[in-house]
Image (spheres, helix red, strand yellow):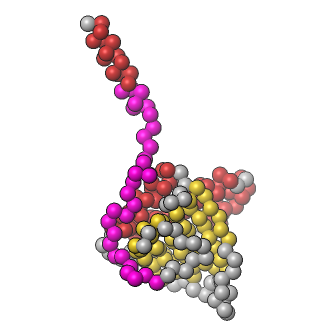
Amino acid sequence: MARLDCAKATLLFLVLLLARLPIAKAVDNAVYAPTKLNICDPCPDLEIPVSRPRRGIVISTGALFSSNASWKIVDLDTHTLKHVSVLIDRISGNWGAPAVESQLLTNDEEYKILMKANEIWAAPHAIPSISVIHPVWGLSLFDENVERREGGAGLPDGEAKELVSIFDEIWQKKININLPLPARTWLRRIDYFQV
C-alpha cells in the first residue's frame, strides 16, 4: 500500500511540475503560408529602399502629395521587425537615404505575426481599404519566390488592418522600452493626434 501511495505522490508531483512549465509557442516549427491564395504571378519588382526578405512581410504607407514614405518589414529568417522611412524629392521622384531602425522579435511576437499573415495568405478575397482621400498603402507577403500583394488608396481594413495593429503594438512596446519617460509621453501625444 505504501508503495502505491509513493507512486501516486511521484506521479502527482510530476504532473504539477509539468503544469508549471511555460508552454512556448514553437515559432520554428510553425508553418508559414501553408495555404497560398491570390498569388501574384508574375509580380513586378517591389521597390523598397532595403533588401526584400526571402520569407516575410512588407507593409508600405505613404500619402498623395507627400514627400514621406515608410515601410514596416518583418524578416522571418532573421526574426526582425524593421521600420524604414525615406524622403522623396517631389520634383524628381528620387529617394533620399533611408532611415532604418531594427528590432529583434520575441517568439511570441513572431508567432502572432505569423498567424495573422497565414490568415491573409489563405484569404480568398482581396483585402479591403477604408476610404480616405490622402493615404495609400501596400502589403506584400513573401515565401521565397511566391508572393501575394494587396493595397490601395486609403487605409488597410480587415486582416491587413489587424496585421498593421500587431506591428504597431510590437514597435511601440519596443521603442517605449528604449526611451526615457518624457519621450514616451511625447510619443503618446503624437499618437493621440494621428488620424
Q: Position of residue 69 (x, y in %)?
A: 61, 78
Farthest residue to the top: give it: 2
Residue at x 65%, y 52% (from the top left corner): 177
61 or 145, nearer to the observer: 145
Residue 48: quadrant of the picture:
bottom right
Q: Quadrant of the C terminus?
A: bottom right
- Side (left or right) of 78 relative to 156: right
Q: Residue 30, position in %: x, y? A: 39, 54
Q: Quadrant of residue 97?
A: bottom right
Residue closest to the eye, 32 or 193: 32
- 89 vs 16: above or below: below
> Is residue 67 positioned above or below 57 on the image?
below
Name the magenta segment's main secondary structure: loop
The stretch in magenta equals 15-44
Residue 155 sits above or below residue 31 on the image: below
In the rendering, at what x and y percent does residue 95 appear? 66, 83
In the image, residue 67 lies in the stretch drawn in magenta: no
Q: Residue at x 44, y 43 (%)?
A: 24
The residue under the point 54% across, 67% down is 73
